[in-house]
Image (spheres, helix red, strand yellow):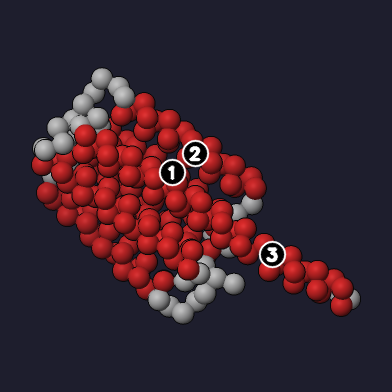
Amino acid sequence: MTKTSIITALLATLLAAPVFAQNAATTVQRDVNQQQRIEKGLQSGQLNTREAARLEREESQVDRAEAKALRDGSMSAAEKRNITRLQNQASRDIAAERHDAQTGNPDAASSKRMQADVQRNVNQQQRVENGIKDGSLTNHEVARMERGQSKVNRKEFRSGRDGHVGAFEQAKVQRSENHQSRRIFRQRHDGQRRG
């Protein structure tokens, strides 16, 4: 290899790292925004528990696509387009569900449980986003965090798909959320830094 090609490869690598970080940060920020919209819909009564559960299933699909895209440490343009397409569909579905004729009781115990779970999703996604921004999470670690968040979202879907989230179901979701929270903490503090 010539000296020029080594320098070119090194420069390309250095310049590409911020782009990959930006892609990951952008998609995670959009996850945060969509989770907040679901939470606000529950709090206002625009969403009932069943609708929120269906939306969580869709968010799980987005998180799985993000995990798959970042698994190799980078996100290609095609992967970014696919994730954007999934996020756009989820966004349209959130808007449609919030503005349909169905309403929920935000003060019902089941709705309160779902609200608490969705708020926890917001917090955990923000922690991942902060890890991307401050460099404490690599893309491989972000992929693992998104895969874990996908599992949490699927559990939320299963617990609320019948329109009711019981205390036992919420406890199962909370165990998964606690596990995910510990994983985020460990990954952010393990000394690996984004290159």
Position above or below: 6 against 65: below
Q: Residue furthest top?
A: 101
Q: Amino acid at mark 1?
A: Gln
Element under disc 3: helix
**Dot 3 and dot 1 residues touching (CB under 8 Å):** no
Residue assigned mark 2: 86
Element under disc 2: helix
Please state the horizontal and vertical placement of residue 77, each as a whole percent of the image: 65, 48
Residue assigned mark 3: 15
Tell me which label, 3 or 1, sits earlier in the chain.
3
Q: Real-space Cα distance between discs 3 and 2?
A: 27 Å
Q: Real-space Cα distance between discs 3 and 1?
A: 30 Å
Q: Real-space Cα distance between discs 1 and 2?
A: 8 Å
Say which residue appears at 50% left-offset and 56% top-offset.
25
Which circle marks residue 61 in the picture?
1
Tell me which label, 1 or 2, sits earlier in the chain.
1
Quadrant containing the C terminus in the rendered view? bottom right
Q: Amino acid at mark 3?
A: Leu
Badge 2, how many Cα within 10 Å: few under 14, some, many 20+?
Answer: some
Front tag of 3 and 1: 3
Front tag of 3 and 2: 3
Say which residue appears at 21% left-offset and 26% top-offset.
103
* Nearest to the observer: residue 50 or residue 31: 31
Say which residue appears at 75% left-offset and 69% top-offset.
11
Please state the horizontal and vertical placement of residue 92, each as a whole percent of the image: 43, 30
Q: Say if residue 125 shows up in the picture.
A: yes
Please state the horizontal and vertical placement of residue 37, each as a whole percent of the image: 33, 40
**Dot 1 and dot 2 residues touching (CB under 8 Å):** yes
In the shown orientation, is residue 99 left or right of residue 72?
left
